[in-house]
């Protein structure tokens, strides 16, 4: 594999605990160069902790977290200024205005783009001379995004970037993410979100996290086409011991009924089950929202992770 094929953002065996509680548990993550990757999961899934370790703001207890081939907590400034980050609760100096912050950030990022900052301020309706204390929470969020994009980094990591934004501002943000990738160079975006509509609009790759682990990951198109709910009904009082479905990620057994959420690469994978005597097999495609709900909304007592 040459350097252009290596993931721009990569985690391997990444783990982190807080007060004995495991927030991230052996996580693997690979974000391809030049892609938009959406990370989804319920509150407490470990998304924010993962992004903070990638940014070098937290030290992993185990494993590695690399951006542009470096662990950012120890990377030189030349590497760190190629990465921009918007945290879930971005704290901007209350007395500073957007114009002041743009000037401050221009000293940190050698590719700082004042015309882009001006364009985004107009598009987002930001009053550049108003101090942060006078702006709404949504407008402060827009300023944080403006600062990240105007740095012209190679990589942007966004933690719930649409939080607090109205639908129009969310749409503008998603459009800016797409424009960011299309303005030349091989730029990469990793963002976490709870808003699946936004993710489906722009993301090419998706990772679904739960309890600090990656439940499913891959190109969005593959997840949408390959993930299915499979139900097998036996004519016996109970499901035979040891029965399983290839590619199953989560299973549930109720009497003679075996239900699984499974990655089915080909319908032929179910033919062996259909050939069993005395069984009925049904399978249904899952969209991203359906998949999210099936995997995370109604968790069985013994999830198969």
Image: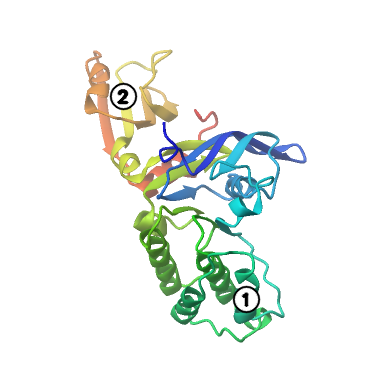
Task: Give x and y (percent) for residue 219.
Answer: 36, 42
Q: Residues within 10 Å of mark 2 (few under 14, many from 20)?
A: some
Q: Is residue 258 above or below residue 130?
A: above
Task: Give x and y (percent) for residue 191.
Answer: 50, 54
226, 177: nearer the viewer: 177
Task: Give x and y (percent) for residue 72.
Answer: 64, 47
Q: Which mark is residue 103?
A: 1
53, 303: nearer the viewer: 53
Name the element at disc 1. helix
Sequence order check, earlier mark of 2 and 1: 1
Q: Which mark is residue 233?
A: 2
Q: CA distance from mark 2 to mark 1?
A: 66 Å
Q: Residue at x 61, y 53 (%)?
A: 78
Q: Residue at x 31, y 24 (%)?
A: 233
Name the element at disc 2. strand
Task: Give x and y (percent) for residue 100.
Answer: 64, 79
Residue occupying the far right of the picture: 19
Q: Quadrant of residue 96?
A: bottom right
Q: Is residue 298 visible?
A: no
Q: Quadrant of residue 133?
A: bottom right
Q: Residue at x 56, y 76 (%)?
A: 139
Does the residue at mark 2 contact the one at mark 1 (Cβ under 8 Å)?
Answer: no
Q: Residues within 10 Å of mark 1 (few under 14, many from 20)?
A: few
């Amino acid at each position: 594999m040459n350097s252009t094929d290596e993931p721009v953002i990569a985690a391997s065996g990444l783990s982190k605990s807080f007060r004995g509680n495991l927030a991230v548990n052996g996580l693997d993550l690979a974000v391809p160069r030049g892609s938009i990757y959406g990370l989804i999961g319920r509150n407490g899934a470990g998304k924010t902790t993962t992004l903070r370790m990638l940014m070098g703001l937290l030290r992993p207890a185990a494993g590695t977290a690399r951006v542009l081939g470096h662990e950012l907590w120890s990377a030189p400034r030349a590497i760190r200024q190629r990465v921009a980050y918007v945290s879930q609760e971005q704290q901007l100096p209350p007395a500073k205005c957007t114009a002041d912050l743009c000037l401050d950030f221009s000293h940190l990022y050698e590719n700082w783009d004042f015309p882009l900052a001006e364009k985004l301020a107009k598009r987002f309706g930001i009053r550049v001379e108003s101090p942060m204390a006078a702006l709404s929470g949504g407008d402060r969020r827009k300023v944080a995004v403006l600062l990240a994009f105007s740095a012209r980094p190679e990589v942007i990591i966004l933690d719930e970037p649409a939080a607090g934004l109205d639908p129009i501002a969310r749409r503008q943000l998603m459009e800016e993410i797409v424009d960011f990738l299309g303005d030349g160079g091989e730029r990469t975006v990793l963002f976490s979100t709870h808003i699946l509509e936004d993710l489906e609009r722009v993301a090419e790759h998706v990772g679904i996290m739960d309890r600090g682990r990656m439940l499913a990951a891959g190109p969005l198109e593959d997840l949408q086409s390959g993930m299915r709910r499979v139900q097998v009904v036996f004519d016996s009082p109970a499901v035979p011991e040891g029965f399983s479905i290839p590619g199953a990620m989560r299973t549930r057994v109720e009497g003679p009924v075996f239900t699984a959420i499974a990655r089915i690469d080909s319908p032929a994978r179910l033919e062996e089950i259909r050939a069993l005597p005395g069984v009925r097999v049904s399978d249904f495609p899952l969209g991203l929202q359906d998949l999210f709900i099936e995997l995370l909304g109604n968790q069985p007592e013994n999830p198969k992770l």
